[in-house]
Image: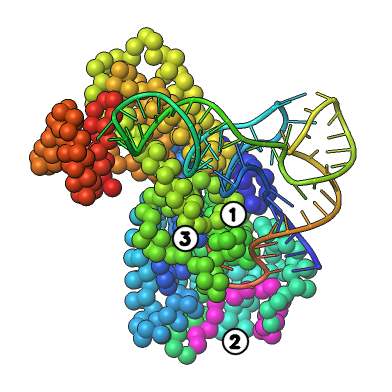
Amino acid sequence: MKLYNTLTRKKETFVPVEEGKVKMYVCGPTVYNVIHIGNARPFIMFDVVRRYFEYKGYEVIYVQNYTDVDDKIIQKANEEGVTMGEITERYIQEVETDAKGLGVKAATHHPKATEEIPEMIEMIETLIEKDFAYEVDGSVYFATRRFEGYGKLSGKNPDDLEAGARIAVDSAKRNPMDFVLWKPKKEGEPAWTSPWGEGRPGWHLECSVMAKKYLGETIDIHAGGTDLVFPHHENEIAQSEAANGKPFAKYWMHNGFINVDNKKMSKSLGNFFTVREIVDEFPYEVIRFFMLSAHYRSPINFSRELMEAATNGLERIQTGVKNLKYNLAHAKEDALKAAEHGLQKEMLTLAEKFDTAMDDDFNTADAVSAVFELIRFANTNVSVETSKALIKETMDKIIELCDVIGVTLELEDDLLDDEVENLIQQRQDARKNRDFALADQIRDELAGKGIILEDTREGVKFRRV
RNA sequence: GGCGCCAUAGCCAAGUGGUAAGGCAGAGGUCUGCAACACCUUUAUCACCAGUUCAAAUCUGGUUGGCGCCUCCA
């Protein structure tokens, strides 16, 4: 199993810190709004990573934080005249609604920054003791020049950074690259007591602290959006490794951006879509399936056309599995027939392509194509004449693989009420009598109720829209 | 200015040395009373130039075009 490590800029074989376990930390959202389609990508893609590790038999300890103290949250709270807690409480709920809808499993731990303040203060104290941090008038800064590896993740050279510093140099800092670990309270802001006075933690610090608390000093995978490489992840490495004296994360994974018209989404360009808006038109499953169509590190464009293509592709998979289910229910023979051994082998060979793709840095585009090939295999080779053994094995395999990428298939028994059953029977009678006008009338009537009838060689099937 | 990524059919997208997966859309066909589903057929020499090699979309150099990070950001 190989994955691309931003730290080394290479695909590496995954070797866990602790046998059989995967400790992963994914940077979570700042909760002051519903998530947008771009936020959804790391949620979905790293959920796929997690599911694949679990499928491979690993125990995954998955941590995703909520940043619940931040300038934007405070601003929003002030605008609405409510407390910061009311805002964060509200949007954590909203984020969880979307995450659940998108098929994202709940993390093992979902720590909130405001609930980890003592541990943060503790880490700052350690950094000051080790002379990696310094206090100036209630602010504490990390001394980047003291940390030898600064820049190793992003490939940036501290000298270049210093020379190109665009931000106005804060005179309190010893070096423009230094970043804040603790910031003093301003009027009207929430604050916590610390050895450096009332204040609140810097953003970068929280992830270092929460990763350590829930996963230990050296974790397997740290993940997030590609924009977090610098400065956020670079700073996390500096803090954690300076404080703990150990490597922070073995593997760094970064997802590419979602663009609109090949441009980064931004509110000013007016090309900004929240998941909630999209769900009005395309279901959550389609959003997820759309994300799977490209490799997680590539940038992808978001558009209605692509969502429609994803809708149709997903439907093809769902129809295929429904047909398998129908065939299984109507097949006559139970045991695998002698003549079916070749087919069984063919099916398993196709399924192997899925694992091969996922083993190669979670190539979901290729993995999905393996699912499509299995669907075609089923549509072509599996019928009611096939043995139940082969139908079931094929169906179970497709369902299992779909579950790994979090594509949910509606498989619960869908029962029709007597009235509808009756109408279908009437239509069948009408067709037998070649009274197609009546047959079509009944079909239209049922279509009005959202039940689409399809006459196949194997009988009448229905689906709901 | 510094660092980095990308360029494959109408659209999306795998493939990183041996002569182009898969999906969507289109066209034609089979099946069907019709429709739908499904199946079959059909659409590329991989931005451009030069080089390395028996062999390159795949390696090297260059050109052009697009994008990202360097500031809060998934």
Q: Which residue does the image show at 30% across and 17% down from the upper left?
A: A385
Disc 3 on helix, strand or loop? helix
Q: Nearer the viewer, mark 2 or mark 3?
A: 3
> Where does the N terminus of chain A fall, quadrant-wise?
top right
- Check the residue under mark 1 and report the chain it is in: A
On the rendered structure, is A363 left or right of A406?
A: right
Residue A137: mark in rendering: 2
Q: Which residue does the image show at 46% across and 65% down from the upper left?
A: A273
Same subunit, tags 2 and 3: yes
Disc 2 on helix, strand or loop? loop
- Check the residue under mark 3 and report the chain it is in: A
Same subunit, tags 1 and 2: yes
On the rendered structure, is A244 left or right of A279?
A: right
Return the residue at label 3.
A37
Same subunit, tags 1 and 3: yes
- Check the residue under mark 2 and report the chain it is in: A
Residue A165 visible to an observer of this rendering: yes
The answer to if A366 sits in the magenta stretch is no
Amino acid type shown at disc 3: Ile
Residue A299: mark in rendering: 1
Q: Main secondary structure of the magenta part?
A: loop
Q: Distance between the residues labelled 1 and 2?
A: 43 Å
Q: Which is nearer the N-term, disc 1 or disc 3?
A: 3
Q: Give the range drawn in magenta.
A: A169-186
